[in-house]
Image (cartoon, rainbow, N blue to C red):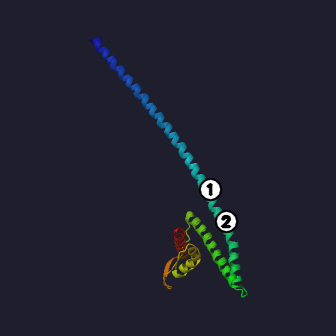
Amino acid sequence: ERDKSSERLNIILFGIILVAIVVLILVYALYRIKSQSADRLLQQQKIIEETNAQLLNLNEEKNNLIQVLAHDLRSPLGNIFNGSQIMQGQEELSADGRKLLGFILESSEKMQALIDKILDVNAIETGKHNIKRESFEIAEIVQKIHKQNEPKALEKDINITTEIENDLKVTADKVYTGQVIENLVTNAIKYSP
């Protein structure tokens, strides 16, 4: 019986040692997997940080380019606008010439507004907003946008009507308000059948 007990004890001891070895192997394997995963995560994090730094640099270069282009466009555009205003004062100008000059003035104003938009987007991205609250009559903006978009609307057989009180005042950013109304009207014309 002692031999059987001793044999059982040896089998149990062998089993415990075998289980301990398997557990140690599993623990080591888990440790290696975890270590490799951590290394991969660190590598991926490093790649993400490098890519993010590159994107930030590209974004800054883009913003600088936008500012340079916008400021470089302002000068010749201002010359066109000012020259057109001077020519509009000429008495010998025909009715067609005055009409054409009016379109040049309006187009140069629109281009100036687009440049301002570009600079505004840049300001928003850099956290420097240029919002100027002021009180103004909204009818002036609505009528101007109506006049500018009426030819496009008529091409699509769309009739634009405006009903607004002339002395209706709002307090807002005049440029942004005009942009919003302009976008609404142009989109309505563009996407109407």
Q: x, y percentage for residue 133?
A: 52, 76
Q: Residue furthest right?
A: 92
Q: Residue at x 73, y 87 (%)?
A: 92
Residue position marked by numbered label 1 in the rendering: 58
- Give above or below for 11 relative to 171: above
First reached walking from the N terminus: tag 1 or tag 2:
1
Q: Residue furthest bottom?
A: 91
The amino acid type of the residue labelled 1 equals Leu
Displayed quadrant of residue 89: bottom right
Estimate how packed mark 2 is, as few (under 14), some (14 to 19) or many (20 or more) residues with alpha carbons within 10 Å. some
Q: Residue at x 63, y 72 (%)?
A: 111
Q: x, y percentage for residue 116?
A: 60, 70
Q: x, y percentage for residue 70?
A: 65, 67
Residue position marked by numbered label 2 in the rendering: 69
Estimate how packed mark 1 is, as few (under 14), some (14 to 19) or many (20 or more) residues with alpha carbons within 10 Å. few
The amino acid type of the residue labelled 2 equals Leu
Q: Residue at x 43, y 31 (%)?
A: 27
Callout 1–callout 2 Cβ contact below 8 Å: no
Q: Residue at x 68, y 82 (%)?
A: 96
Taking 9 as reference, is 55 left or right? right
- Find numbered disc 2 in the image and state the secondary structure of the residue it sits on: helix
- Find numbered disc 1 in the image and state the secondary structure of the residue it sits on: helix
Label 1, label 2: how many angstroms apart (C-alpha)? 16 Å
Q: x, y percentage for residue 1?
A: 26, 11
